[in-house]
Image (cartoon, rainbow, N blue to C red):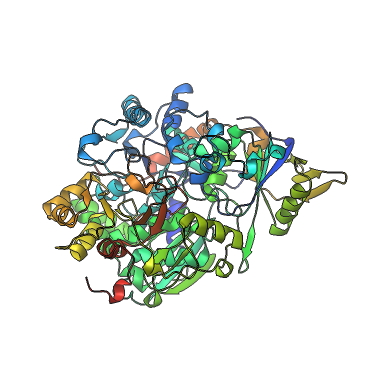
Amino acid sequence: MEAFSSHRGVVATLDRANVDTDQIIPKQFLKSIKRTGFGESLFFDWRYGDDGKPNPAFELNQPAFAGASILVTRNNFGCGSSREHAVWAVAQYGFKAVIAPWQDRNGSRVPGFADIFRNNCVKNGLLTIELSEAEVDQLFDWVERFPGVEATVDLEEQRVILHMDEEVAFHFDVDPVVKEHLIRGLDDIALTLEHEADITSFEQQHETQLHA
Amino acid sequence: MVGKTLFEKIWDKHVVKTMPDGTVLLYIDRHLVHEVTSPQAFEGLRMAKRAVRRPDLSFATMDHNVPTTTEDRMTIRDPISAAQVEALRTNCKEFGVNLYDLQSDHQGIVHIIGPEMGITVPGLTMVCGDSHTSTHGAFGTLAFGIGTSEVEHVLATQTLRQSKPKTFRVEFTGKLQKGVYSKDMILKLIGLIGTAGGTGYVIEYAGEAVRALSMEARMTICNMSIEGGARAGMIAPDDTTYEYIAAKDRPFAPKGEAFDRAVEYWRSLPSDPDAEFDRVLTIEADKIAPQVTWGTNPGMVVDVTDRVPDPHSVPGHSVKDVEQALAYMGLSPGTPMTEIPLDTIFIGSCTNARIEDLRTVSGIIKGRKKADSVRVIVVPGSQQVRKQAEAEGIDKVFIDAGAEWRHAGCSMCLGMNPDQLKPGERCASTSNRNFEGRQGKGGRTHLVSPEMAAAALLEGHFVDIRNWAA
């Protein structure tokens, strides 16, 4: 997997909450047996009209967002189906990072991304960043005022910097395990196989309860 | 020492190793595999020249793409679907994985055949490249969905690198009213906590109303944990669980002395009385009404006696999101839920296509005809369910009512096969997701219990089944 440290690119906004993986990549594209070719189908039903042409009303089709590589969206992004095809589509479209707000609901922190989606992102070197709702609101405001504005996502420093006449920066928290994983671009399976002897000895004492 | 939860007992028993970064290598007892999320994983193994570590613990079937009509089932016309199904065959053969192919009596939705064959028992760790893997938690097992990269990881190592999730106990007190079912319990919970309310947690469902449920009904609740954001939902095993497992025709379940020993172990699994949870919630089951979704996520749900909500009055959703949902659904605020005319009734999916679901629906509609305005599709969850239903004459009840009686598969739950809604069609569905386009582009889905779907297929619209006479 490609290592991630810092990335600068155009910011696009998608002002929708609870974007599920069925929207990110609809069912008809899950029939592929390959790991590539999903970028063109990202947000397919929203992005294209019935005539197959880009839908001008869809946010990401705005000319200012052409070539965008940082996506700012609303809470609970990537909910629903576990399909990793959704992450492949987001990454192959060209996004390197997705930003969504965590929420405070009755005193408990609700993450900005669905669990399985977030996990799948880590496996594919796609960075998910959670900011507060107020901070994400600010990002939406800035992008609306300066469409096509660029930002830098710095994973080492855990900062998002919006490049305007005056720079605006936001700090983000990140799971240290995820940070290490992305920065080093680790291959999980190879890492786990370094512990193969432990797996084998675990198996010798473990009851899998399978009777055939 | 503080007691342990059901989840913690299972988690602790499966830790191969704790890593310096605090994550653990968790051993996986069962890996279920289907055609959609596995081809890239097998390809990854092939490219790295790796084998499947424990093919004996891996079980595959095809369910998502499979046509459900007798004439189309064996020869899939869509060449891309056919290629994906064929890839599963090739991969299972090459890597030695158990496959329940289309000719098998055991083919069906992966989450239906696991419990049916005794692959699912209490105290396990189970995964599948499918978010509804949470279903198996109904047996008191830790079961959760994973992505394709993790599928490959499990195939290669029989383990997963995991951070420990938090625990969330949801207690349903009291007894359900007549006409209210487990589907209503889980929809009610999702309505309360929202579709992200359970993110980061494993939910344990407890309380009198949960204890009273059959295994089938428990599976419905655990199945939809993911719709509340929780990767896993669990219910402590009890005599209901053991009786289900002891039934004949569960080839992988322990038998005889092995069964007795297993039960002894399983009895140690329920959460200790002094176990602590990170979060708790109590819901009065006796106050729950039949639920119907009105929007485009499962948290957009109301009592059947309610009306389509005003965009300004939906907690946890922005006005814009509600307006978008209502526009997609073609609904106006203030419309009584019982006055929404339906075009299609879908009875199926890993949520509600077990034999008990079909028995209940057929019991309600027996001797009656569907409303003229609706098309009714009944898709058993597995070929075993289909066979059992036919042995009981349930197929005749459906056919006489004017319904289409199909073969097993995921079918119109997600429309990867030819079973899809047309744009604008409105469906009462026993499935799990009402996302935009889920059942077909432009299709409109209302999630309900099988009993609510049964009444709706006779009436052509929703009714409050608590005071409705067929």
Picture quadrant of residue B94: top left
The total of numbered circles placed on residues is 0
In the rendered view, tell whether residue A15 sits above or below residue B312.
Answer: above
Q: Nearer the viewer, residue B237 or A165?
A: A165
Front residue of A165/A209: it is A165
Q: Position of residue B148 (x, y in %)?
A: 47, 37
A186 shown above or below A172: above
On screen, residue A194 versus residue A128, left or right, reads: left
Residue pictured at 24% horizontal, 35% vertical: B72
Residue A80 seen in this snapshot: yes
Q: What residue do we see at 45% from left, 62% from top?
A: B294
Picture coordinates of residue A190 (x, y %)?
Answer: 54, 30
Q: Position of residue B207 (x, y in %)?
A: 38, 71
Q: Quadrant of the C terminus of chain B?
A: bottom left
Query: Can I make out residue B8 in this image?
Result: no
| Residue B193 position in % (x across, y down) | 52, 65
Judged left or right of residue A157, residue B284 is left
Q: Pick the residue in front: B404 or B316.
A: B404
